[in-house]
Image: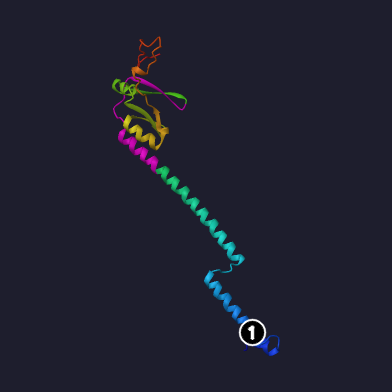
């Protein structure tokens, strides 16, 4: 079977010179495509590539969400572990200690030593899963780095130099165990 060029030459539509020019042009175009690396992309290929890109973005977003959930779980587990390690065990007593949590006044029964520690800022009250724990001040600093919402009450010790000089009631101390 003869090629298209041979058939066109036999019919007299083109001559030998035009056939050679066409072949030369074809080779040049092929060479340029190889050099430039340009490949014509069909419309179907463009659609497929865009769908792949969309799917890739969706997968990345899912991975980010999954990683955020895992990080939140890890932080919660770390909080549980730290509270279990640093919570005070023997604080129960006859003295009611009142504090506010979620716009409500809560109370916890403590002993005198624990009351002194709470008042002077050596202990703090933390909450996790609606349970209250007494934690020492150093551990509270680490806990609040992870999640500041766990801290319920921490009293900073007030120095005498912080009291105003013009305060007319400065010489009258307010007892910490004042019961109304």
Q: Quadrant of the N terminus?
A: bottom right
Residue 130 falls in image quadrant: top left
Answer whether residue 21 is visible to the viewer in this image. Answer: yes
Q: Is residue 1 above or below residue 80?
A: below
| Residue that appears at 44% across and 48% down | 67
Q: Is residue 106 above or below residue 60?
A: above
Residue range (magenta): 74-102
Residue 120 falls in image quadrant: top left
| Residue that appears at 42% across and 46% down | 70
User: Which x, y percent locates residue 66?
Assistant: 45, 48
User: Which x, y percent locates residue 104?
Assistant: 46, 24
Frontmost residue, 159 versus 16: 16
User: Which x, y percent locates residue 40?
Assistant: 59, 69
User: Which x, y percent locates residue 160?
Assistant: 34, 17
Frontmost residue, 179 versus 116: 116
| Residue that appears at 38% across and 30% down | 126
Left or right of 68, for residue 115 = left
């Amino acid at each position: 079977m003869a090629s298209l060029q041979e058939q066109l030459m036999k019919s007299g539509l083109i001559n030998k010179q035009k056939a050679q020019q066409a072949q030369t042009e074809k080779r040049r175009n092929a060479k340029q495509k190889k050099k430039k690396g340009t490949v014509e992309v069909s419309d179907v290929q463009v659609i497929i590539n865009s769908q792949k890109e969309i799917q890739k973005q969706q997968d990345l977003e899912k991975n980010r969400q999954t990683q955020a959930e895992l990080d939140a779980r890890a932080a919660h587990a770390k909080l549980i572990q730290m509270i279990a390690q640093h919570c005070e065990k023997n604080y129960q007593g006859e003295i009611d200690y009142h504090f506010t949590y979620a716009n409500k006044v809560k109370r916890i029964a403590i002993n005198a030593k624990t009351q002194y520690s709470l008042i002077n800022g050596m202990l703090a009250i933390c909450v996790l899963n609606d349970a209250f724990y007494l934690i020492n001040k150093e551990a509270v600093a680490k806990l609040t780095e992870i999640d500041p919402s766990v801290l319920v009450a921490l009293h900073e010790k007030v120095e005498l130099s912080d009291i105003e000089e013009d305060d007319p009631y400065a010489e009258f101390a307010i007892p910490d165990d004042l019961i109304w």
